[in-house]
Image (spheres, grey):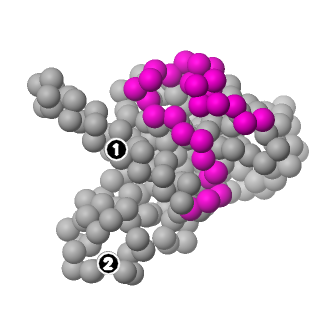
Amino acid sequence: MASGNSDPRRNLTATAVKVLIAGGFGVGKTTMVGSVSEVPPLRTEEVITTASEGVDDLSGIEQKTTTTVALDFGRITINPDLILYLFGTPGQDRFWFMWDELAEGALGAVVLADTRRLDSCFAAVDFFERRNLPFVVGVNCFDGAYRYGTEEVRQALDVGMDVPLLLCDARERESTKQVLTSLMEHVMARSDLAAAQGGY
């Protein structure tokens, strides 16, 4: 899996794909990128100060002490022919102006959801639906949070059956890999469908 185990000459011809990791404030985007990146992840986290009081909603995540102010970046080699470049978006409303730029050239996205604060990912779902960008929903299962079923979450988010929805643990490498693999399968399935319908 790691790039060190692959033939470096073959990696020169690997397809590089840009993927976004999106969602609301505090849903685990930085954790997800860090859990799976095969290079030290780039992080732009800052300590939350009293200046954010009344601006950032910490309901349900009162223990959070840092926040992403620009982006997170990591890389994972899915196989010798496919490398994913992961861009984690900032979650606070005041940084959403960056999403358009981050989304440029992206092949797909993961929308992370926190069942304690499902409304925090509505904006991300709407963003990708409006742009017709393929996405999957990863329900990050936080310790101590009630475990809703996937269909309950699907109904609450009002996403169609065509959108893959998975339970995951953003701290676990294998769990994150499963979400990313599901996204790539979803992207390919949509591409095949579009080709079959004469979309390409």
Above-or-below relation of 154 to 100: above
Real-space Cα distance between discs 2 and 1?
22 Å
Q: Quadrant of the N terminus?
A: bottom left
Q: Which residue is found at the position 48% from the left and 70% from the top? A: 38
- Which of the numbered marks, if any, corresponds to residue 6? 2
Residue 116's x, y, as percent? 76, 33
Viewer-proximal residue among 124 and 47: 124
Tell me where residue 126 appears, x and y as whole percent: 51, 23
State which region is magenta.
Answer: 146-173
Identify the residue position indicated by label 1 in the image. 185
| Quadrant of the drawing holding the C terminus | top left
Mark 2 or mark 1: which comes first in sequence? 2
Q: What secondary structure is found at the residue carrying circle 2? A: loop
Q: Which of the pair 8/97 is nearer the observer?
A: 8
Horizontal and vertical percent for residue 55? 78, 33
The residue under the point 37% across, 80% down is: 5
